[in-house]
Image (cartoon, rainbow, N blue to C red):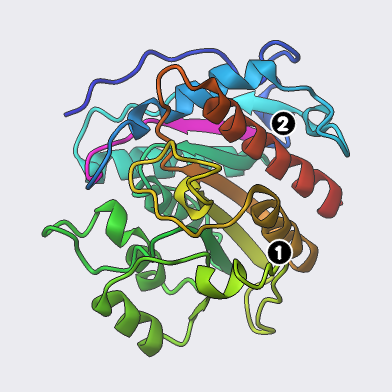
Amino acid sequence: MQNQPAEKTIFLASEIEQCPIKQAAFSILPVPYEKTVSYGGGTVNGPNAIIEASEQLETWDGKSNPSALGIHTCDTVDCNADAEIVIDRIASDVKRILEAGSMPVVLGGEHTVTYGVIKGYLDAGITDFGVVQIDAHADLRDAYEGDPLSHASVMKRVVDEGIPLYQLGIRAYCEEERDTREQNPRIYYKDADDLVPHNIQTIELPKDFPKKVFFTVDVDGLDPSVFPSTGTPVPGGLSWYQALNMFESVAKQRHIIGFDIMEFAPIEGFHTYDFSAALLTYKLMGIVQREQK
């Protein structure tokens, strides 16, 4: 088992007060789960680092003030348990957020967390949605090192639930994952070797892609020059503005029902990356605020 970090402050604590969950447009859910990381560690410290760094944010994100819609920071999910139990705890908290009428904004933790998030939507009776993923890795192995709940298998678990998936920025995957992509007609993708060299800033979702979208961001989907603070960095990723523009292009076409930021592993003494992760979280809130009126 892992050591559970002490819970810290609320998101943007230097600027706002805790908003009651039923009045908050956004609910931050910290999930410091780390069990199956296969290279570098540290994602267990990601949520607290992001929340602490958020105290340095301005409420005006350059285009709007997402905090004006209300932000609630939930209690940290207790991750001192087996994966199945933690996933159920995440699902329960996400369901509670949704039933309160708020939007889950989940901070990981390794990418396995996203499966718990998706289960929370399903448990809340929300089934008519798709997932858009920014990531360096496909995460479509049926199991990794014998573990079907590995971070390398999270998107396989999602598509096994019958949920359509659109992958962006992938540049590391095995033959099994290649075959899964080719054989599953509900998996779509634009890989990094297409997006990055051609400086593609927007995508057009397939006409039959669901109207509701949950957006998952593994920070290693961005280039290591932007986020070296992750367990398995891969060169050739999305730029800062390219990632934001991808999210915005999806928000213009579909209704965003929630998002997460996964696999952030802070590097001691390099506060730039903590702040970048907090700013990314807040920028995505701003895009939702402006595009989902």
Q: Which residue is mark 1?
A: 250
Residues packed near mark 1 inside 10 Å, few (<14), some (14 to 19) or many (20 plus): some
The residue under the point 63% across, 73% down is 210
Q: Magenta residues?
A: 27-37
Q: Nearer the viewer, residue 151 or 221?
A: 221
Three-letter amino acid code at the position of disc 2 = Ala
| Residue 95, position as x, y percentages in the image | 51, 44
Q: Is residue 101 left or right of residue 40?
A: right
In the rendered view, tell whether residue 232 sits above or below residue 281: below
Q: Which residue is mark 2?
A: 24
Q: Is residue 90 left or right of residue 10?
A: left
Q: Nearer the viewer, residue 199 or 151?
A: 199
Q: Nearer the viewer, mark 2 or mark 1?
A: 1
Q: In this orientation, does residue 165 appear?
A: no
In the rendered view, tell whether residue 13 sits above or below residue 117: above
> Any magenta on residue 34?
yes
Three-letter amino acid code at the position of disc 1 = Val
| Residue 188, position as x, y percentages in the image | 52, 79
| Residue 7, position as x, y percentages in the image | 43, 15
Is disc 1 placed on a helix, strand or loop? helix
